[in-house]
Image (cartoon, coloured by chain):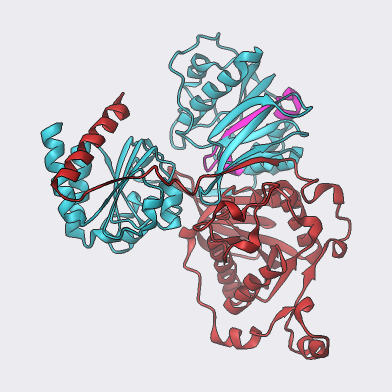
Amino acid sequence: MSKIVVLAKQVPDTSNIRGNAMKEDGTVNRAALPTVFNPEDLNALETALEIKDRTGREVILLTMGPLKAVEIIKQALYMGADAGYLLTDKKFAGSDTWATSYILAEAIKKIGGVDLVVAGRQAIDGDTAQVGPQVAEKLGFDQVTYVTALNEVTDTTVTVERDGEFQTEVIRARFPLLLTVTSAANTPRYPSARQMLRYFKADIKENIPAEERAEYERNGWIIPTLTFADIPGINEAHIGLKGSPTKVNAIRDIAVQGGDLKMYDPRLDGVKALVRDLMKQYVEVQS
Amino acid sequence: MKTAVFIEKRAGTERLRNVTLELTGKAAALMKPFHGEVVGIFVGDRLPEDTDELFKYGMHRVVFYNNAKLKHLHSIAIKQVVAQFVKREQPDIVLFGATHTGRDIAPLVAAQIHTGLTADCTQLVIDDYRDKGKILYQIRPAFGGNILATIVTPDHRPMMATVREGVMPLPEHKTMNPVKFEEFTPDFRDEWVRHEFLSIIPKRSKVDLGAANVIVSGGAGVGNKESFKLIFQLAEALGAEVGASRAAVDFGFIEKDHQVGQTGSVVRPKLYIACGISGSIQHRAGMEESKKILAINKDPDAPIFGIAHMGVVGDLREIIPLMIRYLREEG
């Protein structure tokens, strides 16, 4: 039975970013920020797990990022994923959506036997919604984006509902296929206690003391990493900052709008002043 | 120089989406200093009936491919035709609406023809870039709106970008370009049409938050459904639409149609009034590009004040009735 790959990303918690979290080249210093499992990637994982519940298919989480991103693989294992791979290499750093999707697609080919890829609609750090479709393109898969419900699953097709903005589209699509899933699709399940007990020691081999390797291996606690060298045929000219068609030319911090906020007293006079200012604003709005 | 615009029909109608007019106006403004051309590309079952409108906004030529099989969003087929168009026309710039259609097709096209794509641009500017001559500076918010990034595609062509509906204003002075259509005959294979559209369920005429100039939104801090009437009353006094945070929807104060935020509508009104909304990142992602934001909240440390332009700390159940009273007096 073909495998399902879930694409997920560990993202900085975008509610709390200041200028000092940006590096000079315009990319983000992730290490300086708290991180979370990208919310809609959890919906993607849940969709894959629901298909697993119905069909028994294997669910594999694939993420690219620094070593710390192993945390979301563990979270996926706790929720019921069967395995996870961490794509990690300095050569991958600085990749835009084109280069990222190229690396992910090459990794999916390396994993092999995959005919369904499920991704979150978009990540909260970039909000581009581009990596999913671009992976589909590079794998030659068909796609359905903005999936809001999973209906029927057969050996060859899946029926989903798609948010077409003005309409809901009920689509039966054939494998091989990539879906991007929105938060409306489901409520991600809680980690199971059984899975947590089974995997709480799981880690990448870089973090495992040599004398414990054998024990980890025996218990299936090693989370495999994929580096540049592990992916046959990957073209170095197409990855990283160099392989990215888009470049970040400048970054302007717009988080702090200090001094821009005018406060009004909640009592009579304050509210009067507020309404006067609102009316001025209102005249501008109408003109 | 040449800019191509992806022409989109509003689902369930035979008419153009507003974003297509907006992009055409923007493309015309970008091309004007270079006496460049604006070319539209339409791929679908049939051209929108009001396509001629585009010529009033600076379109020079519309290339179209009509095929009855493409009534619905068959991503692969549409991508194939657009990519062939791009290869033939060799535009410098290609613009898509950041709609659920544009964000489905544009990444496929960019991936296939190996070029850069920048999502949800809020500004587009052509200027010199190092030794590359004139290129497109694509400016977009990122990190939940915490930063504004300028993205460039120096070495690949075309330079591709998506722009959300309502972001680029329609130009005031209409041009009167002659109407010029050109039928496109791409290589087309029926095997690219793979999805079965089992049914199409129109969404019931929903609250049009996207088009509203003024939005009054309520959150968990409103307290209960009864108090939420205050939000409706303030909206009525201002001629505004009513929005809500996810919490207000989850508590059952108001229907989901009104939800603003990452999982609801993304809005950019000229005035956004947030009442009893703390301003979680999810909510802010849907409204922080409003031109002016007024926050009314009991908690002076609520994150909403971090993005607001006007603020009142206090009980909205006292403040809103006062506001309505003075609005009636002033108005």
For residue B42, say whether it is visible: no
Residue range corresponding to the magenta coloring: B85-104
Residue A246 appears left or right of B18:
right
Q: Is residue B238 above or below residue A174?
A: above
B147 over A153 or under it: above or below: above
Colour chain B is painted in: cyan
Residue sitting nearer the eye, B11 or B20 = B20
Question: Which chain is drawn using red?
Answer: A
Q: Quadrant of residue B166?
A: top left
What quarter of the picture does the N terminus of chain A occupy? bottom right
Determine whether A187 is above or below B38 in the image.
Answer: below
| Quarter of the image where the C terminus of chain A is located | top left
Q: Position of residue B104 (x, y in %)?
A: 59, 44
Find residue A66 and report its horizontal and vertical position in percent.
Answer: 71, 65
Residue B91 among those drawn in magenta: yes
Residue B260 at x, y percent in the picture: 38, 50
Q: State the residue at coordinates (48%, 59%).
A: A183
